[in-house]
């Protein structure tokens, strides 16, 4: 995933990505609100929710809430507790646009084994941002981001230009409202 834009206060980040046929994600969370749009192509998205109390940091009980094919123009709205998995099961690449309520590429978040419930931890990073991620002995995460202050603004070729044009009027304080007017919408909190 490529960082297209993030303001200096890092209160949101706009991400663009291309999913190749067969590409998939683990079941995962974002630990912030998320707008997940399909710019072109189609994606299969499964939404999950935790059914436990969250007290065990290593094991979660999750259940699938829904699964459907999202096509061009669809936007999924996820709350802070949203959990999902996305696959490209089509024969063509999919272009997607995501907006998150934080610096998502440098956020430690969780993956979930849908069978065992085992919770993993990961930091996705950005394909177009240099960084080093270090897990220390106590497994607390420290992130050293090289050039973070100077490489804040990105435009990934034509995709970036198109995304910035289309999303230029969306402000973080009304992003949910703006996206809620999209014709195809799913929501989980
Ligand atoms: Fe996601």
Image: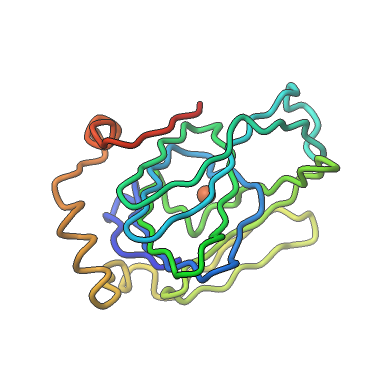
Question: Which of the pair 84/60 is nearer the observer?
Answer: 84
Q: Position of residue 97 (x, y in %)?
A: 35, 56
Here the colouring is: rainbow
Question: Which of the pair 185/152 is nearer the observer?
Answer: 185
Picture residue at 33% right of the left edge, 52% below the top: 72
Residue 171 lies in what quarter of the image?
Answer: top left
Picture residue at 31% right of the left edge, 64% below the top: 4
Residue 80 sits above or below residue 40 on the image? above
Q: Residue furthest right?
A: 116
Picture residue at 60% right of the left edge, 52% below the top: 108
Q: Position of residue 88 (x, y in %)?
A: 53, 60
Q: Position of residue 7 (x, y in %)?
A: 27, 54
Residue 62 sits above or below residue 169 on the image? above
Q: Is residue 50 left or right of residue 160?
A: right
Picture residue at 78% right of the left edge, 37% below the top: 57
Q: Is residue 54 left or right of residue 123?
A: right
Residue 179 lies in what quarter of the image?
Answer: top left
Q: Is residue 116 left or right of residue 74?
A: right
Question: Which of the pair 42/77 is nearer the observer?
Answer: 42
Q: Residue furthest front?
A: 91
Q: Is residue 3 left or right of residue 46?
A: left
Q: Position of residue 23 (x, y in %)?
A: 58, 66
Residue 70 sits above or below residue 179 on the image? below
Number of numbered discs overlaid on the protein picture: 0
């Amino acid at each position: 995933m490529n960082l297209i834009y993030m303001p200096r206060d890092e209160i949101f980040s706009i991400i663009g990505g291309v999913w190749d046929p067969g590409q998939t994600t683990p079941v995962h969370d974002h630990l912030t609100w998320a707008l997940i749009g399909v710019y072109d192509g189609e994606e299969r998205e499964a939404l999950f929710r935790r059914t436990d109390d969250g007290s065990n940091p290593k094991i979660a009980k999750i259940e699938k809430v829904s699964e459907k094919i999202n096509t061009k123009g669809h936007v999924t709205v996820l709350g802070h507790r949203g959990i999902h998995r996305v696959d490209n099961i089509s024969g063509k690449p999919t272009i997607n646009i995501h907006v998150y309520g934080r610096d998502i590429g440098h956020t430690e978040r969780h993956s979930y084994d849908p069978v065992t419930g085992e919770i993993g931890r990961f930091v996705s990073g950005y394909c177009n941002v240099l960084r080093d991620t270090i897990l220390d002995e106590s497994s607390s995460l420290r992130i050293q981001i090289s050039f973070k202050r100077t490489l804040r603004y990105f435009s990934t070729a034509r995709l970036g230009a198109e995304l910035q044009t289309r999303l230029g009027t969306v402000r973080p304080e009304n992003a949910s409202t703006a996206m809620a007017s999209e014709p195809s919408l799913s929501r989980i909190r």
